Amino acid sequence: MPSIHHHISTLRAALNSYRGQQDSKQCIALVPTMGNLHEGHLELVKLAKQHADIVVVSIFVNPTQFGVGEDFDSYPRTLDADVAKLATVDADYVFAPSIDEMYPVLPPPTSVRAGEITTQLCGQSRPNHFDGVGIVVSKLFNIVQPEVAVFGQKDYQQLAIIQQIVRDLSYPIEIIGAPIVRAADGLALSSRNQYLTEDERNIAPVLHQELQRLAEQLMQGQHLEQGLAPLLTETRARITEADFKIDYLEVKTAQLDSLETDGASASFDGNQQELVILVAAWLGRARLLDNQLVTVKLP
Ligand code: PAF
């Protein structure tokens, strides 16, 4: 079973005992989560295990990344079940702090803001969300001081923001993006999938299917004939028809630059470019996120 710590001081003491060893400097990996773990989280831990000797999984439903009216109060808290699942993948430590332990003052007067990248996509409808992610992840990095940290690629924008924070604040941490884990019907695994009713769960895979269809159209070069806008309009219409309320559906460069900006040519390689299709859409109570990388020909 992983060893559980609720306090920063005891976790630090436990981890320092590895760092203190003269002969073998053990590599520590951090997997930050909000708990209610599913197979996707366990894959993050398995990947962390491949890169480190000791894996710390944090479980903390972070209040600063939830907006007013969002699901902070109802977010499922399932610590005992989470710890049992983590035991099956040999996680070494669970860090499950209280809100007071993480935030002596709430909201914290200190902020970690990653700038423009946070204002697009999810940042449009969740204006302070990534500031909350920025501060909690920075705190976790300072508490655990890992050599490696693993995040899921399902939260594509979050991963890009964390990579930027690591670069800008000179954290000596390698950030690893883990592939999206999907159910057999293609739905990206997420703790929020459990908000779906049975009918909605049957509809939910449409999101992934539509991303794949759009990716296929882009690979075939349909945007070269008719432009991107009509393809996006058709995709939005199909997703809406399936009963989703779209928050956004966008195509960006893999670095999250707009296609119209100079940034688009920054990753230009011959006449090929890697793009990412990103979607956030509501289905009933669940806000679902998904994305799909695709390499396309440019005009
Ligand atoms: O992706 C999540 O679960 C959260 O945003 C994270 C990274 C654990 C920060 O609270």
Image: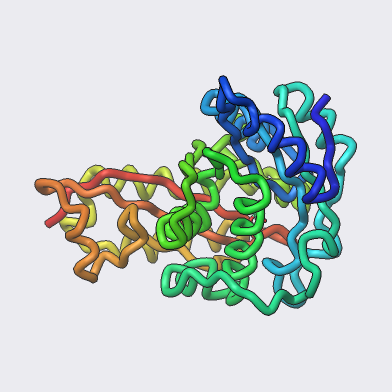
Looking at the picture, tell me which residue is in the foreground, 168 or 240: 168
Answer with the quarter of the image where residue 285 lies: bottom right
What is the number of callouts on the image? 0
Q: Residue at x 21, y 53 (%)?
A: 267
Answer with the quarter of the image where residue 81 lies: top right
**Residue 256 locus on image (x, y percent):** 36, 60
**Rendered view: 292 above or below 233:** above
**Residue 298 locus on image (x, y percent):** 16, 54
**Rendered view: 4 above or below 71:** above
Q: Residue at x 30, y 57 (%)?
A: 253
Q: Quadrant of the C terminus?
A: bottom left
Q: Residue furthest front?
A: 22
**Rendered view: 175 above or below 254:** above
**Residue 289 locus on image (x, y percent):** 57, 54
Left or right for 251, reference 51? left
Looking at the picture, tell me which residue is in the foreground, 261 or 168: 168
Q: Quadrant of the N terminus?
A: top right
Left or right for 272, reference 94? left
